Image (tube, rainbow, N blue to C red):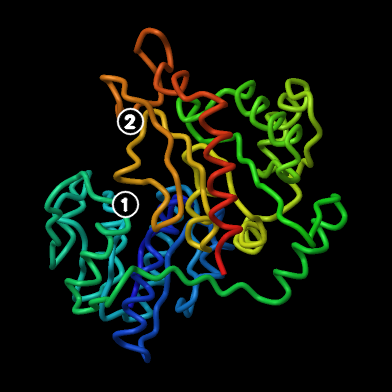
């Protein structure tokens, strides 16, 4: 089976239960996942994937890979991306059965032999993807399952990083992610700084700011804003080690972002701050999480540019006191678990 979900990080995590369902239904199936190179290290750690097929960013690289994929003689191609490029790749693969969403964009449904209807756009991405699994006959009893294959080497690498950076491994620590791909998704650094100050003042736990090397400038700005110490892990942990890192945290405070979905997938409580996007569609999946969002008439607008006045009111109405109170409550609930 050819599984096409090339990006992005959160979408890849949302697709994991489909792999789990297919693997449960057909244990002997061979599954190849097509993913953009920048996200391949995450897919390498998705349990049930036999082969990770890396593609580049350009259409030329996709056409080149299509010739190679065709030689593999796939029986079924599943396209969860739902764009022209991914639909065309399914067709170019030569798979006689090609499945995707009837509501796919850019004409992608033209390339499918089976089109899966989506009853409403206001359903979570995980549940929407599971419609494809069900169309294949892969039904799941209970909640969709997210299964990362986190190795001992991954865990040891993370322990070494935490020890070197001064994050205590013998008591709970709190991960904070202040970054997001869209600027309109980003809660204000000064507000994150106030939450960090409250955590430090009350002795709730050690704060570690996470992110890629691209997020180091955000961490530096936060350092200048916050009056309290925190540990900077931006750029210190590879993408592939992110599941192991977040599984060791007590809680994640975050914007709507890829790390939010990984934390939810590994069962770590999430305090998620939502502005222009919909938590109904892409909030942290599962129980034990808390989404903080405001009631502004234009929300969700799904826009990368705010045209509302006052600007970013949806985020401004979420206060540091509200976020800190939620952090305290979720930590207390987690501590009371047997």
Residue receiving disc 1: 85
- Residue closest to the eye, 99 or 283: 283
Looking at the image, can residue 18 be seen?
yes
**SS class of the residue under badge 2?**
loop
Residue 140 figure quarter: bottom left
Residue 305, horizontal then vertical, whole percent: 40, 20
**Residue found farthest to the top:** 309
In which quadrant will I find the C terminus? bottom right
User: Which residue: 79% across, 62% down?
Assistant: 170
Relative to residue 34, is residue 299 depicted above or below? Answer: above
Left or right of 166 on screen, residue 274: left
Residue receiving disc 2: 302
- Residue closest to the eye, 189 or 69: 189
Residue 55, horizontal then vertical, whole percent: 48, 59
Residue 255, horizontal then vertical, whole percent: 51, 37
Residue 286 figure quarter: bottom left
Which mark identifies residue 8?
none
């Amino acid at each position: 089976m050819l599984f096409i979900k090339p990006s992005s990080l959160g979408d890849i995590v949302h697709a994991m239960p489909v792999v789990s369902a297919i693997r449960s239904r057909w244990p002997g199936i061979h599954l190849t996942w097509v993913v953009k190179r920048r996200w391949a290290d995450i897919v390498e750690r998705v349990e049930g994937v036999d082969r990770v097929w890396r593609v580049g960013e350009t259409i030329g690289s996709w056409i080149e890979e299509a010739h190679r994929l065709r030689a593999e003689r796939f029986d079924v191609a599943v396209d969860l991306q739902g764009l022209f490029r991914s639909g065309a790749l399914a067709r170019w693969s030569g798979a006689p059965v090609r499945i995707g969403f009837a509501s796919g964009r850019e004409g992608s449904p033209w390339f499918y032999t089976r089109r899966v209807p989506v009853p409403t756009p206001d359903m979570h991405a995980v549940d929407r993807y599971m419609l494809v699994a069900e169309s294949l006959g892969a039904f799941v009893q209970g909640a969709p399952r997210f299964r990362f294959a986190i190795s001992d080497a991954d865990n040891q690498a993370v322990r070494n990083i935490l020890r070197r950076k001064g994050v205590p491994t013998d008591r709970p620590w709190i991960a904070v992610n202040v970054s997001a791909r869209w600027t309109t998704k980003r809660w204000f650094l000064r507000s994150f700084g106030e939450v960090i100050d409250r955590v430090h003042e009350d002795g709730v736990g050690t704060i570690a700011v996470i992110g890629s090397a691209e997020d180091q400038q955000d961490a530096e700005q936060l350092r200048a804003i916050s009056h309290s110490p925190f540990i900077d892990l931006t750029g210190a942990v590879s993408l592939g080690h992110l599941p192991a890192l977040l599984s060791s945290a007590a809680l994640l405070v975050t914007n709507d972002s890829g790390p939010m979905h990984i934390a939810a997938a590994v069962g770590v409580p999430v305090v998620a701050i939502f502005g222009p996007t919909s938590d109904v569609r892409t909030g942290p999946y599962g129980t034990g999480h808390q989404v903080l969002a405001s009631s502004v008439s234009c929300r969700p607008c799904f826009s990368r540019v705010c045209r509302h006045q006052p600007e970013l009111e949806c985020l401004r109405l979420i206060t540091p006191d509200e976020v800190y109170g939620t952090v305290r409550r979720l930590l207390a609930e987690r501590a009371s678990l047997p």
